[in-house]
Structures are given as structure tokens and as C-alpha cells.
Image (cartoon, coloured by chain):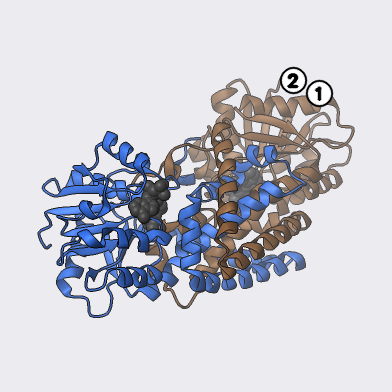
Chain colours: A brown, B blue
Amino acid sequence: MMALAHVTIVGLGLIGSSIARAVQERLPDVTVTGHDASSEVRAAARTLGFCDVVADDPAAAVAKADLVILAVPVGRMADAAVAIAPGLRADAIISDVGSSKRGVADALGQALPGHLVIPAHPVAGTENSGPAAGFATLFEGRWCIVTPPAGAPDEGVAAVTGFWQALGAKVETMDAAHHDMVLAMTSHLPHLIAYTIVGTASEFEEVTESEVIKYSAGGFRDFTRIAASDPVMWRDVFLANRDAVLETLQRFNEDLTVLQQAIRRGDGAKLEDWFTRTRAIRRSIIEQGQDDAAPDFGRKH
Amino acid sequence: MMALAHVTIVGLGLIGSSIARAVQERLPDVTVTGHDASSEVRAAARTLGFCDVVADDPAAAVAKADLVILAVPVGRMADAAVAIAPGLRADAIISDVGSSKRGVADALGQALPGHLVIPAHPVAGTENSGPAAGFATLFEGRWCIVTPPAGAPDEGVAAVTGFWQALGAKVETMDAAHHDMVLAMTSHLPHLIAYTIVGTASEFEEVTESEVIKYSAGGFRDFTRIAASDPVMWRDVFLANRDAVLETLQRFNEDLTVLQQAIRRGDGAKLEDWFTRTRAIRRSIIEQGQDDAAPDFGRKH
Ligand SMILES: NC(=O)c1ccc[n+]([C@@H]2O[C@H](COP(=O)([O-])OP(=O)(O)OC[C@H]3O[C@@H](n4cnc5c(N)ncnc54)[C@H](OP(=O)(O)O)[C@@H]3O)[C@@H](O)[C@H]2O)c1
Ligand SMILES: NC(=O)c1ccc[n+]([C@@H]2O[C@H](COP(=O)([O-])OP(=O)(O)OC[C@H]3O[C@@H](n4cnc5c(N)ncnc54)[C@H](OP(=O)(O)O)[C@@H]3O)[C@@H](O)[C@H]2O)c1
């Protein structure tokens, strides 16, 4: 990988602080500067010590950086880019970690004309947010998707790829539009569904909230984890990746209608057949190291 | 609790074998006889040793039992009851663990006229099934819902309640119809949604199955766990609890339409508001000990 001496991370929440921690552990020769728009987050970052320097000013924060990573909500990428622009080295590579890529690539391209922008998305996270929630091993064994714009120089792509590999991630390259469709299916739609059902349960008059909580171990509690994810981050994802999300949602609705009809008609064969096919995917996910084989996610019982 | 000397468990899969194991650990003076319709399962049960006796004949299996627990799929309860009927003591209590209660109560009442039937449902499980999947601590700290029929004698209800408490469960009593509505919301609808989305993802042409698997850590993998649950068990639950499931599904569909419209219109305020409200339920579930506080279910990263 291209020798990186200085990395600046803008946005020191779950993802930004996890990157900083992973660099400290795995790339001890690289200097990490951090910046966050929030003075409270900057203060927390100083206390937690995962950056070499925490800068108050965004342009000053990036002055020495070979690589700048924007780790702010998708709807704040443009602001963050405008704020760092005056300080950027001409040869700096700018990347990000946004959960949707087409809109972010456009916003960064417009905000940073003449700069090399190589967007990326580490497919890893938890339901928590903020600087205290991060940890160095978050990206180990997970995939990071790099979405280079057309004509991006190979060295730039290689630098971003090498950086994520150094943090323990596996890297795949694809175009931004395909990324957005893949993630709509594997991440954005699941979050939308989880947010929906948790809302439904909490408003359903025939079952009290206390009952919903008590009997959540029957399956519901799994959905509440996802639906506890950061509201601002997810609002931005749905606004930014609207078309792909709506397309996957339409398919989901069709399938749900099929199963609804099977239940109404008492068509047990159709239900059993459907439920049998969905088992295979779980097996592959475990075989490929993307989830734990322990029953019930390894929860203590 | 009423002194139980002999418990018989019919159906030695995940739930039945977990009950047997828990009795061996926590009620060592109680003799456990097991029976399963499948000779393979009976052989496995003998090898695994979680019953004192494994009987080949259902009527013989219950001959000494104070308490019989039917732990077969909901659609097999009637068969299992008919098979044990000739062997039952007149004063035996018959209970079950079925995930839906109204239909099961009717079926057992018809199959066992003159016998005392006190249905129950331990709200605990994993995505695995079969005799090897069970473990003694499955019910610890979880709720078990007992749904006594109108006019059931207090001693019978107390015996079933005491039995589940002895296995580490907390017990709540409610009528079968309310149980079915509560569980439709907290367990059956979540399973239906998870089965649906996993099916949708695996059929979606724009994203390969390999991509779905690779990038499942973005949220999708959580749904695959639930959608790996036993197809026959779940087919039966949806057939047996049709009306309540369809009622919760209608509410879910309404809410999903609201969020779909908010995405289409770019109504970020509505999305953020919804996503903020759903966080509170997660906190309560953790505070009440119904899930682990560790991020991402405590998965290793
Ligand atoms: N969480 C996940 O699971 C996950 C996974 C992969 C990718 N991502 C992506 O990673 C990015 C960050 O997510 P996260 O989970 O780390 O969020 P987070 O924990 O909320 O952290 C984001 C941080 O960025 C700060 N910020 C907002 N606007 C800023 C600006 N203009 N300049 C500098 N800092 C700013 C925020 O400060 P305030 O608190 O003051 O707003 C906050 O401290 C998002 O684009 C998200 O889509 C998230
Ligand atoms: N899994 C959960 O999370 C969970 C939680 C709470 C309650 N429940 C309820 O518990 C019950 C059992 O579920 P499970 O997960 O333990 O299923 P399981 O692991 O599939 O075990 C069920 C066992 O019952 C046997 N069986 C079927 N019909 C029978 C009959 N007529 N007589 C005797 N044995 C028979 C089955 O044999 P074959 O394999 O030959 O069919 C199988 O070995 C179901 O009513 C379910 O709704 C399940």
C-alpha cells in the first residue's frame, strides 16, 4: 500500500472512532488527527485518547493528511467537505464511510473540485453511536466496499483498499449505483422493517407495552436492537438512497402479500416450502464467517 | 407446588429435551419419562441421556405421570393427545408448550374429555430444533404463559405454575385468546417478516445471493437467524393463529405504508421522529433482563 504517514478522520462517532482505534493498534506509525463538529465529542475524544491530535478547526485538521476520511452522517458529508476544503493538500485522497454512495459521491465531487475522492463503505457497525461506542476490532473480517468514480487512478484506489485491509477488512470494489442497490437489500430495508415493526408493536392497542417487553424473547427483541440505531444516521440513509430502498420495499411487499394470502387460505404447503428455502442462506452466512454459529447469536440463557 | 413424582414429556425436540434437561438439573427427585413419535429421536434421546426412561409407546409413557407435557408442533397436538389418552391416569394434569394456545386448548379438550388440561407456553427458544439442540438453562429468567381454561381448579394451575418456576421461568396467567394476540405481535409477526425478507433477498435479481451473504452484517444477517427456524413448527403456528397474525400484519402494513410515503416524499422529520421513538423499547427490554446490553447481541467482532 502507498505509504500513509498522516490520516485525518472527520466525525468521531462509532465509525470514526473505531477507525482511529484500529489505526492506533494496527498502523502505529501513522499519525491520526481527528475532528468533530461537536465540541463535546472533541472533548470526549481527547479523554478517550484514540487520536494523536484532536483539532478544533476542520481545515487545520486536514492540513498534513495524505488520507482524509469523512465519518459523518450521509446528509452532512457536503458540509464537512466544504469545511475541510481550504486546508486540504492538493495530493490528499478524500474518502468517506457513508452507508449510501451515489449521493455522497456527487456531493463530495461538487464540494471538492479537483481533488481525488475515493468513497468507501465498511459494512460493519453496531446499534450504538458516539465516540465511546467505537472499538478497534469492528472491521475485522467484515467487508469494506470501495466505489471509485470512473477514471479514478489506480494508486488512489489501491491506497484506500490497502488502508482498509490494514484495519482487518476484506475489500470489494463496485460502482456506486450497484452498491446502493446491494445495501438497500442487505441493510437499509432490514432497518426500515425493524423500525416499522417496533413502532407497530408499541402502538398496538390490544397488547400493552409492558407485554411487548416481557414476551420479546419470542423474536421481537431481535428487531429492537436494529431499531435502536441512530435516528439521524438512518433518516439520512433513507433520504439519500430513496430509489433503491423503494425498489426493494416493493419486492418485499409483494412477497409479504403472497405469504399473507397463504396464511388466510390455510395453504400450509406454500408456507412450509417458503420457510424451508430461507434456511439455506443462514447456513452460508455462517460458513462464510459473517455470523456466529452459536444458537440465538450466542446469547447467554 | 404440588408434589410431582413423575413427569412425562411427549416430543423430545428443542423444547421437550430442554424441559427434560432442566428437570434433571433442578428437580432431581422427579422421574422423567420421554416419548417421541420418531424412533430416531428416541434413539438420540437415549444416547443423550436427558430422560430417566424413553418409552416407545405413547400410552405406556404416560402411565405413571402426574404431569404430561406435550412438546410437539402445534398441528400435532391432537394426534399426540389421542395417542396418550388410553394410558393416562385419571388425575394426571396434561399441559403443553405450543406457541399458539386457542386452537391447541380446543384440540386437547376434545381429544381428552374428562381430563384436566392446563396449557402453557414458555416464551423461550432458539432457531435450532431437535433433541441435541436443547439445554437446561433455556427457560431461566424467561416468561412462561399459562392459559387455564375457564373453571380450571386452582391446584392444577398452581402445579403447572410451580413446575415452570422450578425450571427458572417467571409465570404469567392470561386467557388463550389474549395470549394468541400478544404472541402474534411479539413472536409470530416478527417470524413472518423475517421469513419474508430473507425470501425477498434471495430472489432479488439485482443483487446476487453471494452479495447478500457477504454484506449481511449490515443488518440482514439478524433476520436470517429467525428465518432459519423450523419450517414445520412455524407453518403450524401460522395456520393455528391465523386471525391474530393477520390482524397484526394489517397494522404492520399500514405503518410500513406511512414510512414508505415519508421516504418517497423526502419527509426527514417524520422518519427521524419515528426512529427516535423506537429506541425506548430497546432500553426497557434490556433493563428488564429480556436481552443482553452488549452491542450487537455481544457478537464477537
Ligand atoms: N453505525 C453504523 O452501523 C455504520 C456502519 C457503516 C457506515 N456508517 C456510516 O458512518 C457514518 C457515521 O456514522 P456513525 O455511526 O459513526 O455516527 P455517529 O456515531 O453519530 O457519529 C457521527 C459524528 O459526526 C459528527 N458530525 C456531524 N456533522 C459533522 C460535520 N459537518 N463535521 C464534523 N463532524 C460532524 C457528529 O456530531 P454531532 O453528534 O454533533 O452531530 C457525530 O459525532 C455515517 O455516514 C453512516 O452512514 C455507519
Ligand atoms: N422452538 C421454539 O423456539 C419454541 C418456543 C416455545 C414453544 N415452542 C413450541 O414447542 C413445540 C415443540 O417445538 P420444538 O422447537 O421443540 O420442535 P422440534 O425440535 O421439532 O421437536 C418436536 C418433536 O416432536 C416430535 N413429534 C411430532 N409429532 C409427534 C407426535 N404426534 N407424538 C410424539 N412426538 C411427535 C417430532 O418428531 P419428528 O421430527 O419426527 O416430527 C420432534 O422430535 C411446538 O409446539 C412449538 O410451537 C417452540
- Residue type, label 2: Met
- Residue type, label 1: Glu
- Taking the view exactly as shown, the residue that stands out farthest to the bottom is B151
Give the vertical position of B26 relative to B76 (above or below). above
Q: Chain of mark 1?
A: A
Q: Is label 1 in a helix, a strand or a loop?
A: helix
Report the side of A250 relative to A206 (left or right).
Answer: right
Give the vertical position of A20 relative to A74 (above or below). above
Q: Is label 2 in a helix, a strand or a loop?
A: loop
Asked if labels 2 and 1 touch by Cβ distance under 8 angstroms, the answer is yes
- Taking the view exactly as shown, the residue that stands out farthest to the front is B86
| Ligand 1 neighbours mark 1 (CB distance < 8 Å) | no
Residue visible at 18% across and 42% down in the picture: B52
Q: Position of residue A249 (x, y in %)?
A: 70, 59
- Is residue A37 at least partly visible in the picture? no
**Viewer-side residue, A218 vs B42:** B42
